[in-house]
Amino acid sequence: MKSISLNYHHQRGTHCITTAMMNLLNHFGIELSEEICFGLGGGLGFTYARGRDMDQFMVFGRSDDLELNICEILGVHAILKQEHNSEKALQSIISLLERGEPVLVDLDTSRLSYLSRTLDWPEYATHGGHKAVITGYEEVTRTLEVYDYIWGTPRSLPVEDLFKAWKTYSGISPASNLWYEFTVPNTFVDLDQALRKGIYLNVYRMLTPWNKFHGIDAMRSFLREVPNWPYLMNEEKRKKLAFSSYIALEIGGTGKSAFRRMFSRFLKQAGHILDEPQLINVGEQYREISLLWTELAERIRVGSIDPNEGIFSGSQDNEQLTDEIYKREYEQFQKLHNLSSNWL
Amino acid sequence: MVAITERVAKVHQVGSHPKLALVTTMYREHQLTNGWMKDLSINEGFIYGLSSGVGSLYLDRTESNQSHLLIGWNSLDPLLDLSMSTGTWVNRRFSADSNQAVEEMRQYLTQWQKPVLAPINCRILNGLRDPYEQYRHRLPFPISYCLVSEITDDKVSIFLSNQNDVMKIPLTTFKTAIEGLTNQWVDLIFPKKELNHRWSMWQSFARNVHHFNSGWRGLSSGLVGLYDFLENEPLNHRALEDTFLYASYLSGDLGRGWYAEYLRSMGEEFNDTRFFETSIIYEELSEAWTMAIYEMENANIHQGLLKGISSLEEKALNNLSDLANRNKKVRVG
């Protein structure tokens, strides 16, 4: 009977992906803070979109493929694997564990037994994209040892519960039995070089998104529209969207303020490492911007309880707040653009 | 969807590598349609340089009862490398079966009017001219690739790396050819505005030098991988066959000629003669590898030639490392 438990050091964090990557990279031999991981992956972003098969708009404050970007920037190769048959997929995970490799998996938060109760995601906001690290397996009890960002100790997850949260093909970004395998370089990319590349790419992706549903364009649309949702949707829909937006901006593993606080800390840390005072200055500006996002999230939360209050009250204060957020954030990104254009 | 086929047909050219050639076509189609990278000449060698660049991976395949394989680059996933260098997003698809894959591809083609890249079992496609087919099935990668440009109720239009013209194959044949590989097709999403060329080229160059110098844990890679190949005596017959195959994928010389050209482009972009000097070494390597492979194909392993290659490769890598270190603060704006 198989019984595997890897020697894996886990530190708690504020976001699932950055926490998992911080700990995995530590396992591979490079010690970085969660904020540095966020910045290396070009983590700041914005998404405001509704797909054809989605009832709800999707609102969140970070970029895509964070885990892949962090790896690429540091010279690690991450490959996304998938197997429709859950038992076969599990066997692949066990094989990796037997080789001493922790496994990053994609999961649906709302169906994960130990997390759905904690975060209380509404059913309509079901989505994959949540990341956790499997570090052990007990064949007798068919349970897995799983590290997740909120807890300091591993969760014991029955295989059947894993399958419920892993084999999902509905909602946003379904988990679809996905996992990652890593090939690690003998030496990592120099951190100075990696930080500059991460910032350069973050600026590019924020200012030049793939389409209007991402980056600065999406943020502008969201900030312009959110006080005007009463004109765009009925009360029931508004309440639902306000609630899921509040969670996505302020609660669900964002470190509050739609990841802006984490970004502020990243810039300050990067500024010290690179000896670039301008980064520290922009980091401080982002701390102030993060407070505005928290204020906005609170008004959205109030609107989710009473669809004619808070952000939906019709008060001019709301549009002043959203205008200020956009203006200040755009200014800071222009500063980062000017700064990073001189780097390599 | 007819329009996609016409656009792809305008830019598609026979290439060397089953995947890179088609990715090159995707970039050229976007260049034609959207004016992207309009000042650049996009060809397979340029895409090779941007994605991974010259290198040496010497894969141990003994677990699967296969001989080692030397491949001539540093990339474990050229699409991912390209996405970082050029700002594209690789939208990976995980269709459950061939019916779902076909339906999802059809929806994508209709909505976005862009081709998709799909792994395909080319053995299913009768009449495909592929001299290396007998070896290809032993490779540890998806068998081959095609660009899908149109799906009707009974036909699928595809482009292959080794044919200029579009192939129209029965839908049922296509479904059989992608069965088992349906969770690996992708579409590429290009950003609204292209990345600064200098940044793209430098990012690729710096990454490649890092990969070549560092190598990967658990893989015989970088210069060590190359030495492992060159010093593997006796090189067994199957290892050589697969190496010939990979050499042919990378323009017959393990990509050394392509990289010489890429370095010349960098020299022009960065106005630095040292890129040209290193480019000349890669031209020499291109000739040396071509000759060595010719000798190997004739069952001669010319030790003197291989030693010369080893020495030139080391010299070239030293030059690349020197360039990467000295140019850490190149202005790209």
Image (spheres, coloured by chain):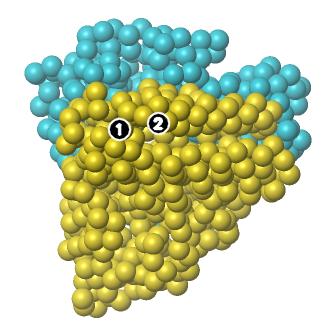
1 or 2: tag closer to the N-terminus: 1
Q: With B280 as the anchor, is A9 left or right in this view?
A: left
Foreground pick, A250 / B195: A250
Residue at 22 percent of width and 51 percent of height: A124
Q: Position of residue A244 (x, y in %)?
A: 32, 50
Q: Categorize mark 1 by other alpha carbons within 10 Å: few (<14), some (14-19), many (20+).
A: many
Badge 2 amino acid: Asn
Q: CA distance from mark 1 to mark 2?
A: 8 Å
- Label the cyan chain with its letter: B
Residue at 48 percent of width and 13 percent of height: B34
* Chain letter of disc 1 in the image: A
**Which shade is chain A?**
yellow
Q: Position of residue A74 (x, y in %)?
A: 65, 54
Reading the image, the residue beneath label 1 is A312
- Say if residue B207 shows up in the picture: no
- Answer with the quarter of the image where residue A117 lies: bottom left
Q: With A225 as the anchor, is B201 left or right in this view?
A: right
Q: Which quarter of the rendered picture does the C terminus of chain A lie within? A: top right
Q: How many marks?
A: 2
Badge 1 amino acid: Phe
Q: Position of residue A308 (x, y in %)?
A: 29, 40
Q: With B80 as the anchor, is A333 left or right in this view?
A: right
Above or below: residue A83 compared with residue A289 = below
* Chain letter of disc 2 in the image: A
Q: Which quarter of the rendered picture does the N terminus of chain A lie within? A: bottom left
Reading the image, the residue beneath label 2 is A318
Q: Position of residue B92 (x, y in %)?
A: 37, 42
- Answer with the quarter of the image where residue A307 lies: top left
